[in-house]
Amino acid sequence: MDELNICRERGEGLRRALDEVYAYAYAEARILALQSKEVELKDKSFALEERAKKVVALERKADGFRVEVEAKRKELNFLRYQVEISRGESNAEGVRLSEVRRLVEECEGRDGDSEEAERKLKDLTLVQDKIEGCEKVSSEVVSKEKELEVVCKKIDLREQAVISVNNDMMEACQRMETKRKELENIQKPIEKHNEQLASAEIAPALAPGTVLCL
């Protein structure tokens, strides 16, 4: 009877030992899974760092575009100022042109006034040149305005890209933080269980010379 009890105790000891072995194996498997998750998080962290570098590069480009826009605006304002002056001159020259034409017509109708007519024609040519110059400046202003619109659109696109990447990074960081907390919550009980297994003394399954009874 005593021998039967001893065998039963031995069997219970074996079962407990096997349970602990299974628990340890499960814990090891969980640790491996967690380590794999950790590697995955590190890879994502590296990817985020790379995206952060891209964001910095985009912001620098946007800053460059802003400087370019500011320079274009100053140039455009200067050209607009010149256009206003040119328009005033053009209006004055238009009045003068009408007067010169009238005088030329009068000179052509007179005898002996060919010299006066020639001088008036030269004045007429100068007036026409000034008017053409005003029109050229006006066309330059229109061209600069179009260039400014293109640069502004580029800046808007760059800023939208930066905002989009920043939003993606914030979402990814939040996901990583959630995964990190999950990892800690899972890892703590596993580490505690491993400490218990390491400190526990597992009795030998069978003593030398004993027979296992089934």
Image (cartoon, grey):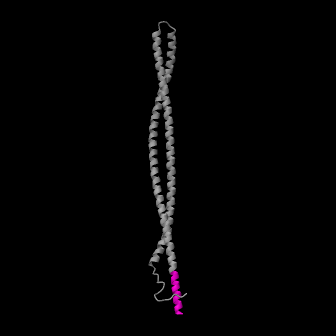
- Which range of residues does the magenta coloring cover? 1-16
Instruction: Name the residue: 54% across, 90% down.
Output: 4
Residue 11: say if magenta.
yes
- Residue 162 x/y as whole percent: 49, 49
Which quadrant is home to the C terminus?
Answer: bottom right
Residue placed most toward the observer, 99 or 132: 132
Residue 95 visible, this angle: yes
Task: Label the magenta part by its dominant secondary structure.
Answer: helix
**Residue farthest right in this picture:** 214
Relative to 115, residue 202 above or below: below
- Residue 154 x/y as whole percent: 50, 42
Residue placed most toward the observer, 74 or 214: 214
Residue 85: say if magenta.
no
- Residue 87 x/y as whole percent: 49, 26
Residue placed most toward the observer, 89 or 72: 72
Relative to 183, residue 11 above or below: below
